[in-house]
Amino acid sequence: MKSLDTPSLYIVRLNPADLVTLSGLLTSGLALLSALNGLFPLACACLFLAMLGDALDGMLARHLQLERPFGRYLDGFVDMQIYLVSPALILYLQGFDGFWMFFLLLLMGCGCTRLAVFNDIGNIREGDDLAYLGMPVFWNLFLLAGFQLLVLWLPPLLLHSLLAIALVAFSHAMLWRRPFFKFKRLSHIFALCLGGFALLAALQFLVGVPHG
């Protein structure tokens, strides 16, 4: 147990990597605000910005040699907001409610378990590279983005059925004991996150602002 005799005004001292992690609360908060106002593509676009911060905080921590258990736990808590709570609320507000809520609860339960395992063991080694054990939760945003596109063309029952199947498969994959690819190149990370943001922001511009 650590001594509490060390003089400090606060219970923890945040470093630059921690601040990048916490930026996810701002961007995901904007996502929730957008969703509550019916701006669903924009809400998803904000989550892709949140994903960019989530990808960069670990790189920054490793580059500045700031890695510590606290940072990994903080990252896990913020990830719950970005990849589990926010997408579930967005989908619920878009009509994925009632019976369909079972699949959102399944997603959140498996996602929380996946994040807890990551907090315990971190990344794993696959050859000379780092990898994830179990499918990482951030892939949920790609399901959410696909939903925003398909909602324009598919009838609700078919769309909800396809999403339910996808959520069951994704929930299973998050707990599957096998290595999953980890993005390492900044160019790939920026392309995915900013590309997703631009696509969804453009989609919001095309569908416009809901009336009433």
Image: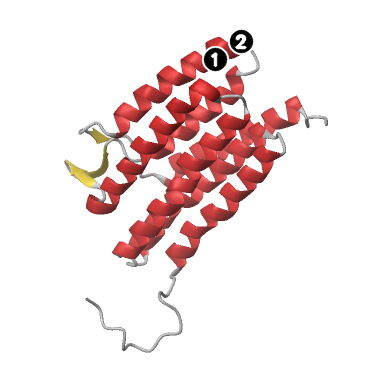
- Crowd tier of the residue under label 1, counting other residues whose Cα lies within 10 Å: few below 14, some 14–19, many 20 or above: some
Q: Name the residue under label 1.
A: 159
The secondary element bearing badge 2 is classed as loop
* Residue sticking out furthest to the front: 98
Residue 59 location (% of width, % of height): 38, 55
How are the colours assigned in the image? secondary structure
Say if 176 sits above or below 100 in the image.
below
Residue at screen point 49% across, 45% down: 82
Residue 155, numbered circle: 2
The part of the image, by quadrant, that contains residue 145 is top right
The quadrant the N terminus occupies is bottom left
- Give amino acid for label 2: Pro
Residue at screen point 40% across, 60% down: 60
The quadrant the C terminus occupies is top right
For this rendering, which residue is in front, 156 or 174? 156
For this rendering, which residue is in front, 34 or 59? 34
Residue 183 location (% of width, % of height): 36, 41
Say if 48 sits above or below 170 in the image.
below
Residue 87 location (% of width, % of height): 52, 36
The secondary element bearing badge 1 is classed as helix
Could you tell me if the residues under marks 2 and 1 are in contact, i.e. CB atoms within 8 Å?
yes
